Image: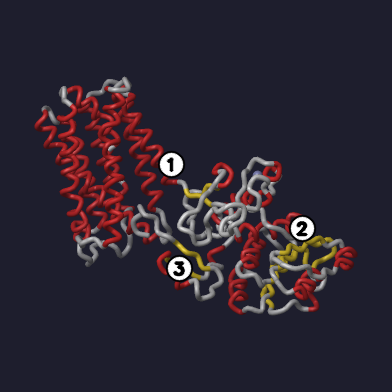
Amino acid sequence: MGVWASQIPRIKASLSLSDSALAAVVLCFAVGAIVTMPLTGALATRLGGVRTVLAMGVAGAAGLALLGLAAGYSTLLGAALFAGMALGGLDVAMNTQATAVERAWDRPIMSGIHGWFSLGGLAGAAAGGALTGASLSIRTVLLIAAAVDLLATLGPARWLAVPGTHAASAPGFAWPRRAVLGIGLLCLLAFLIEGAVFDWTAVYMHEVAGASLGFASAGFGGFSLTMAATRFVGVVVPWHICCGDCEQCRAGLTASCLEARSACFGLPLGGHWGGLFSDLVRVPYADAMLVKLPYGLDPVLVASAGDNLTDAWISVRKGLARHPGGRVLVVGGTGSLPLYAVSHALALDAHSVDYVDQDEARRAVAKTLGATVHEHIAPDFTMQFHVVVSGTRDPAELKLAIQSAKPGGHVSGLAIYFQDIPMPLWEMYLRDVSFSTGRPSVRPHIPDVLEMVRGGKTHPEHVTSRIIAWDDAADALVEPSLKPIVVRPRAFAAGK
Ligand SMILES: [Zn+2]
């Protein structure tokens, strides 16, 4: 497709076509595509996804060759119709198969697949431009493209199969539901723009902007590049607003940013930014606030990275940085936070992790994560742990947690106390035990946490109790659950 787009201004020049004559050629292309697109669904149910991709890929190669071989205007129109039929069908066949692959993958990868499609478009446009610059004829360039298309279709076909998905019994055509119609309408508008860019940028670059025929394909190349970029990128946003540039932010204390004045998502502090369950969030200071999601990492897996998952990481790191390989005690009580701490502590090579919680379900999760579990802080815990992470809201239990720290040990307080509570400061003084608490400045630590999850070291998935569809969120959230994650489908991704 990229190569074809790069050759449009050359074809226009070589046949001395007017703008409207060229428009008829690209219209034939589009009409061909519209004819086969709905039929390809039916074909895929009959033949199976892989065979349909193969058939359409071979037909696409033939279409490119025919476009190259077309000697006059009328044969060009016919070739465009055929190529449009083949490439339109290939588009549907590839997306159908990609949906099956994504389902089998059990992780949303469609955006990445479309990203590679855009990179293919970029490569095609660049190759078309280079071959044009090397003075190869239109015919040669398109025949080369046809040969590459054929090889790219036949070569990897054997790896495309997804077990249990060939020849489904579902109908190949179904009348769309209202929601699908709405998305279809949006796609129509998007395709209007994409079609105009695809068919006319190279012509515009050459005839209006004065670019050489070889360089004219750079317009479509740039379009493909930016499309690929947006398709590969996902982001994590920290719970607090931070500018990234003030004295506090530069010291890593982003939750106390001087510019943001305590602003955060979900609470009307320092302005309204949306969040919690708003439809939209406003994200200021994009350079500082947007943390890139590593390619291939499931966003559902790290839904908590902007808040609890990273908060727990900071609390564990504080102690283990001082006592590498130390013994860790985690006291539960504040939902998922202490459980994330268990996973991080083991990921950071703690000698061992003991977990205390009266809640049976949370103890079970801690055990799955690899902790030794207890119902209460036992008397023989006294002075046994290098690092204590305390999630309890009970002041008496907090005191026991602090007493469990070894001399020189560190206690991180995860729970929020809204009033002053007594602390065993004399014992802490005698044993040189330090204690930390505070609104977590998660922003600087999010990339580290994402890497730990991507590397399979930290396991937030064991803490996730439910994954809820956006439409069911209102009902589901009434029932208490350890760590529900609400997933809203993306408008332009198939499958999920
Ligand atoms: Zn700041």
Residue count near mark 2 (Cα–Cα under 10 Å), binned few <14, some 14–19, many ≥20: some
Q: CA distance from mark 1 to mark 3?
A: 31 Å
Tag 1: Cα neighbours inside 10 Å, few (<14), some, or many (≥20)? some
Quarter-of-image position of residue 170:
bottom left
Q: Earlier in the sequence, mark 1 or mark 3?
A: 1
Residue 381 on image: x %, y %: 78, 74
Q: Position of residue 462 (x, y in %)?
A: 55, 67
Q: Please, is residue 213 above or below residue 284 in the view?
A: above
SS under mark 1: helix
- Which of pointers 2 and 3 indicates the residue nearer the eye? 3
The one nearer the camera, 472 or 170, is 472
Q: Earlier in the sequence, mark 2 or mark 1?
A: 1
Mark in the foreground, 2 or 1: 1
Q: Amino acid at mark 2?
A: His
Residue at the disc numbered 2: 323
Q: Is residue 234 left or right of residue 29?
A: right
Q: CA distance from mark 2 to mark 1?
A: 42 Å
Are there few (<14), some (14-19), or many (20+) residues within 10 Å of tag 3? some
138 and 236: which one is in front?
236
Secondary structure of the residue carrying tag 3 is helix
Left or right of 2 on screen, residue 336 = right
